[in-house]
């Protein structure tokens, strides 16, 4: 065992966090935790992990749920395709594998939403297969320790780091090694202000010696952020009923519910919205009330949404959803924030 592995495992033995998915090798639990923690901090993801296990104790329970139930539980985590793929994969495991989890990297990576990282995590932790995980934490640790210049978001870098990680993995206990290097990246070799003064790898860390810690890992600048202007129409009839529409197009939030939406190239006035080609017929006779003059900013990975909400009192219409039941639908975080502010 080389010095990198031995010091990493010793550090992990002393410093690992007590997390519920570390007390089991049940592949369903490990899979659930890994999918939830993609793009999500542990503190934020833990309540979701516990809620999912409470609602769906087994992969078959998850498979038998309807998509709206799954998306409602996922509400607030973002990247909703993760939840949809989780549900699709659960159905395959439940119905094609009779509820028994595939036990190899090759079978796991063929499931919807399971990429190389997740397949490696499940295969190594649950089935002791020596497959190295490479996530943001691993990229950072390896890029700094070996002072690697390859960008982590380009094919040449991705391939290099995958091969490097695989060459280092502890074949005797790959699951513990994978958890150790990810934990080390999360707690010691942090993105900002890494704790180099007490780092057990400091003596042999090339970036520390070369004063390039702040430059690693290297990442090519992402594409420019796109601005989108959303105008939500929130209809209310005389019985305090409203209307929600399920997003079906291949765009953000597919499968979630929202109020009728008019999108423009800029923030639109009431007059412009009334003449919008997609304005619903019932909006013509409604009384329009702007909920808040201040624009609501909602940032996604490559998009910034600038939203306004309009309350439309529609005395001559009847809508299908009681306002009291709106909270039972899976909605984007942007809509959820509005609902917290607006009460009937």
Image: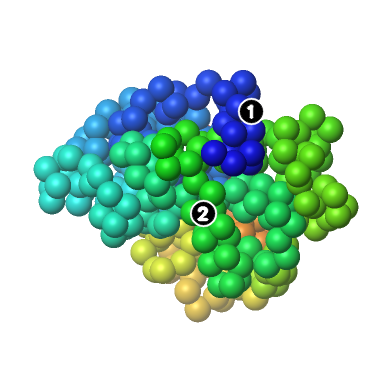
Residue depicted at 47% across the width and 74% down the height: 278
> Looking at the rendering, which quadrant does residue 175 occupy?
top left
In the rendered structure, the answer to whether residue 340 lies left or right of residue 68 reads right
Residue depicted at 60% across the width and 27% down the height: 10
For disc 2, the marked residue is: 167
The image position of residue 160, as x and y in percent, is 57, 65
Q: CA distance from mark 2 to mark 1?
A: 20 Å
Q: Few, some or many C-alpha atoms within 10 Å of disc 1 (few <14, some 14-19, many ≥20)?
A: some
In the rendered structure, the answer to whether residue 14 lies left or right of residue 344 reads right
> Looking at the rendering, which quadrant does residue 154 occupy?
bottom right
In the rendered structure, the answer to whether residue 11 lies left or right of residue 101 reads right
In the rendered structure, the answer to whether residue 263 lies left or right of residue 255 reads right
Reply above or below: 228 against 199.
below
Q: Few, some or many C-alpha atoms within 10 Å of disc 2 (few <14, some 14-19, many ≥20)?
A: few
Residue depicted at 68% across the width and 67% down the height: 150
**Front position in the image: 287 or 214:** 214
Circle on res. 223: none
**Front position in the image: 33 or 340:** 33
For disc 1, the marked residue is: 11
Circle 1 SS class = helix
């Amino acid at each position: 065992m080389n010095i990198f592995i031995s010091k990493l495992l010793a550090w992990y033995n002393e410093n690992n966090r007590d997390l519920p998915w570390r007390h089991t090798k049940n592949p369903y639990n490990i899979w659930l935790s890994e999918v939830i923690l993609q793009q999500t901090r542990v503190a934020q993801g833990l309540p979701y992990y516990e809620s999912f296990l409470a609602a769906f104790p087994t992969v078959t329970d998850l498979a038998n749920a309807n998509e709206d139930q799954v998306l409602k539980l996922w509400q607030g985590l973002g990247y909703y395709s993760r939840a949809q793929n989780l549900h699709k994969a659960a159905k395959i495991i439940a119905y094609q594998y009779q509820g028994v989890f595939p036990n190899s990297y090759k079978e796991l990576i063929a499931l919807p939403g399971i990429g190389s990282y997740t397949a490696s995590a499940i295969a190594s932790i649950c089935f002791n297969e020596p497959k190295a995980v490479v996530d943001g934490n691993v990229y950072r640790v390896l890029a700094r320790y070996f002072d690697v210049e390859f960008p982590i978001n380009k094919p040449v870098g991705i391939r290099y780091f995958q091969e490097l990680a695989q060459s280092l993995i502890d074949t005797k206990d790959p699951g513990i090694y994978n958890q150790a290097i990810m934990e080390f990246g999360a707690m010691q070799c942090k993105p900002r202000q890494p704790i180099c003064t007490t780092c057990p790898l400091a003596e042999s860390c090339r970036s520390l010696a070369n004063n390039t810690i702040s430059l690693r890992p290297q990442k090519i600048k992402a594409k420019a952020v796109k601005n989108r202007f959303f105008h939500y129409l929130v209809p209310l009839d005389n019985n305090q009923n409203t209307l929600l529409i399920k997003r079906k197009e291949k765009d953000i939030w597919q499968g979630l519910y929202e109020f009728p939406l008019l999108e423009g190239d800029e923030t639109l006035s009431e007059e412009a919205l009334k003449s919008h080609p997609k304005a619903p017929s019932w909006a013509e006779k409604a009384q329009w009330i702007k909920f808040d003059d201040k624009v609501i900013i909602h940032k996604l990975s490559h998009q910034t949404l600038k939203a306004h909400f309009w309350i439309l009192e529609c005395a001559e219409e009847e809508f299908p959803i009681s306002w009291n039941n709106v909270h039972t639908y899976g909605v984007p975080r942007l809509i959820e924030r509005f609902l917290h502010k607006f009460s009937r």
